[in-house]
């Protein structure tokens, strides 16, 4: 009973936090048709959202990006015949859903592409998120996001990531960046790993081999795909060919 009450509170808060701000400034919107020409399956689309929850996430991460979605290409063409459902995302109100690119053509966006991802692993990443369509958004700590919309003292940077470490531990729930992080971790593709050295079998043995240590998927934020040295930033205006001498200024 107690958890049902918390879930109801979480859903009401989610609905309130998901409402857009009236004043949103878009600097570099890219038409959906252009995004469709440039994007490849496995690309991560980062979005500068306009909702109240976006404001909280951007404050906590000190980043422009508040939302992320995975481009799956035509993987869902048979399921959504006649509809351009090429992105899979975890939405605070709808859960894990497939949405069209046109949803974000009026927002500031960034494309992050995993470098040299094989065709087989691309398929596995896409399949991972597609299999989770219909899962719920994790509302366990939605109260924290609501609380950080209120005037509070500046939060130390080393605590912000911990605050965003949502997670009920329920595999049928997900948030936007952790869903995508899990997909890439399922094929051992790095995002922002920790660096360390492997310890030898004998006590006192000097470690020699440098190894990567994976962060828990609940600690990832949309900004991490932008920061990652293993994802290339793709800018549509440059990919299509750019000559500054052809620009017309007024």
Image (cartoon, helix red, strand yellow):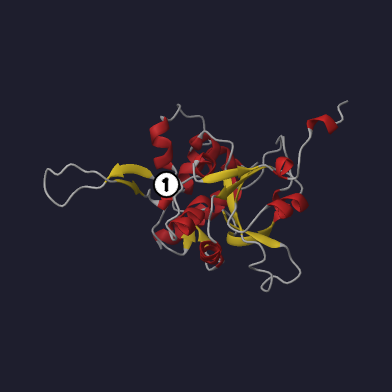
Give the image location of residue 6, x and y in percent: 45, 55
Q: Residue furthest left?
A: 203
Q: Residue furthest bottom?
A: 78
Q: Determine the residue positioned at 55% across, 65% down.
A: 123
Q: Which residue is mark 1?
A: 219
Q: Is residue 193 above or below residue 188?
A: above
Q: Is residue 48 visible?
A: no
> Dot 1: within a 10 Å radius of its alpha carbon, few (fewer than 14), some, or many (20 or more) residues?
some
Give the image location of residue 114, x and y in percent: 54, 51
SS for tag 1?
Answer: helix
Q: Is residue 40 visible?
A: yes
Residue 106, image quadrant: top right
- Quarter of the picture holding the C terminus: top right
Viewed as shown, does residue 89 lie left or right of 172? right
Q: Determine the residue positioned at 50% across, 46% down.
A: 230
Give the image location of residue 139, x and y in percent: 48, 54
Viewed as shown, does residue 211 lie left or right of 14? left
Q: Determine the residue positioned at 82% across, 30% down.
A: 245
Viewed as shown, does residue 208 lie left or right of 221? left
Q: Determine the residue positioned at 67% across, 42% down.
A: 235
């Amino acid at each position: 009973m107690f958890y049902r009450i918390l879930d109801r509170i979480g859903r009401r808060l989610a609905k309130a936090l998901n409402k857009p701000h009236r004043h949103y400034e878009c600097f570099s919107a890219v038409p959906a048709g252009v995004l469709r020409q440039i994007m490849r399956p496995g690309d991560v689309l980062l979005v500068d959202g306009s909702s109240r929850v976006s404001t909280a996430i951007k404050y906590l991460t000190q980043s422009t990006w508040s939302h992320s979605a995975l481009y799956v290409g035509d993987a869902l063409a048979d399921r959504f015949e006649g509809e351009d459902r090429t992105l899979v995302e975890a939405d605070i109100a709808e859960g894990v859903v497939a949405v069209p690119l046109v949803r974000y053509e009026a927002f500031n966006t960034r494309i992050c592409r995993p470098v040299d991802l094989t065709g087989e692993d691309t398929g596995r990443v896409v399949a991972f998120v597609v299999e989770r369509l219909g899962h719920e958004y994790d509302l366990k700590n939605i109260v924290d996001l609501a609380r950080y919309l209120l005037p509070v003292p500046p939060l130390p940077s080393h605590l912000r990531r911990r605050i965003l470490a949502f997670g009920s531990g329920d595999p049928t729930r997900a948030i936007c960046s952790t869903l995508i992080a899990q997909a890439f971790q399922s094929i051992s593709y790095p995002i922002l790993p920790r660096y360390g050295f492997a310890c030898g079998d004998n006590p006192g043995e000097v470690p020699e081999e440098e190894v990567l240590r994976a962060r828990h998927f609940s600690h990832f934020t949309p900004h991490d795909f932008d920061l990652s040295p293993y994802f290339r930033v793709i800018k549509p205006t440059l990919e299509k060919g750019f000559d500054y001498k052809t620009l017309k200024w007024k």
